Amino acid sequence: MPEQPRSRRQTRAAILTHLLQSGGSFRPPLAKAVRLSEASLSRILFDLKAESLIEEVRRPAPYVGGPTGLVSLDGSVALAAFELTAQHLSVGVGGLSGELRYTERVPLPKKPTTETVGGVFREAMALLRDWTRRRRITLSQIGVSIPGLGRLSISANPIIPCDVGRINGMFAEMFADVPLEFTNSVVAHATFHRCRTENYPFNDAHLFVLVSQGVAGTWMDDPTETDALQPVELGHMVFGPDGPRCRCGHHGCVEAYTSLPAVAGLLGVAETELLQLGSDWVSTIPMSSRVRQELRRRLFRLGLAIGNTLNVKPCGGVAISGWPSMLAEDDRNAVVEGIDACLLGGRKLAQVSLAFVPPSTGNDPQAALAFAAFCLASRGGMPATSTEAA
Ligand SMILES: [Zn+2]
């Protein structure tokens, strides 16, 4: 297939997202990965260095031809992250490589409303403004992660009540010059894994599934494309209209069987206790064989939901994160069997590889920070509003 010519923004985005996902690279493999001659790469790296987006240290290369420059993202870039969870809003400032310089948590009330969640955002924004002003720090990007955020839920979020339009307005008042992006929390977690997990199993397009307080997925594609990250509401695939009620308002969604609150019911422990334990419940709460049987049935359903998603849009890989990743292989196999049972042609014929990656909940605002880094890198470190120039 002939290659499409790339704009300057896309070429810069290819370099920056590669560095973000690899954590740093020597010049020759970097040139190869982003399909540039070393001379062209050199010219672009010169610009990126002048803009303080990358740095380079001379280092002996681990192959013939060294020494050369090890290129990595500049440690001085400051990003802000806001991550909303069921219990609190995390705010933080960090760098492109994920190191946090500041973090604070503002608790949510027990029964949050659109007004109180808006107030919590305002408080967190004020904390961030004070902190950055005192240190004269200029933010390059703000990333905001909100559970349940979707195309239809800008003002009516079914998971946590919040009015994104109004929150957007507050940001415009307090941080007028800083590029701002909102995303669904599953997209933020997917980005976190893609950028921060060493030896992340997939380089190409794949499906990322998060099983935690909710169940959701993200299509992960070429990071330089505008629709590189697409949330997939596979958790709300209905398996029985007579099933348990889901927080989305329907009955019998796969989420109503496999989310942490649903599993709390099965295990007979309080939801708050299980949410506190997070994925660790797997090693701390004993299970009777009857409960284990039922858990496997639910995992099988999760597999069916994933397989059905792949039937709709085939792709070569699935990464599953959350509590199922902590289970013993025998239990986890129920997910694999579910995928096999409904994927057209089965997993082998469809050439789908499957990987369980460790859970990432409880580390907020790291996912929102990774998302902010991704936003900056995928627009090539260029202003959000600048026009395309080839
Ligand atoms: Zn639902």
Image: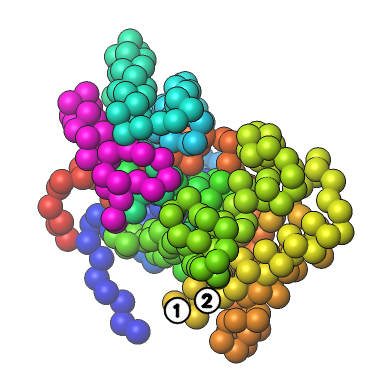
Q: Please, is residue 390 above or below residue 192 in the view?
A: below
Residue placed most toward the observer, 314 or 204:
314
Q: Residue 38 is drawn in which quadrant? A: bottom left
| Residue 243 is inside the magenta segment | no
Residue 278 left/right relative to 383: right
Range shown magenta: 151-179
Seen from the viewer's position, the closer of residues 253 and 95 is 253
Choose top left, top right, bottom left or bottom right for residue 250.
Answer: bottom left
- Which quadrant is home to the C terminus? bottom left
SS at badge 2: helix
Q: Which amino acid type is shown beneath numbered disc 2?
A: Asn
* Viewer-closest of 224 and 11: 224
Tell me which amino acid carries mark 1. Answer: Val
Residue for badge 1: 312
Q: Nearer the viewer, residue 141 or 358?
A: 358
Q: Residue at x 32, y 23 (%)?
A: 119
- Measuring 80% from the left and 64% from the top, which residue is drawn there? 293
Residue in the picture at 71% in, 67% down: 297
Q: Residue furthest right?
A: 289
| Residue 49 picture location, percent across and down | 33, 39
Kindly give the residue lying farthest to the top in the view shown.
Answer: 134
Quadrant containing the N terminus is: bottom left
Decide: is 368 above or below 37: above
Label 2 crowd (10 A; few <14 / some 14-19 / many >=20): many
Residue 342 in sight:
yes
Determine whether label 2 and label 1 are within 8 Å by CB.
yes
Q: Can you identify the residue that label 2 sits on?
A: 308
In the picture provided, is 39 more to the left or to the right than 258?
Answer: left
Is residue 81 depicted above or below 133 in this figure? Answer: below
Residue 377 placement (x, y as % from top left): 35, 47
Task: Mark 1: give few (<14), some (14-19) or many (20+) Cα within 10 Å.
Answer: few
Measure the alpha-carbon separation of dots 2 and 1.
6 Å
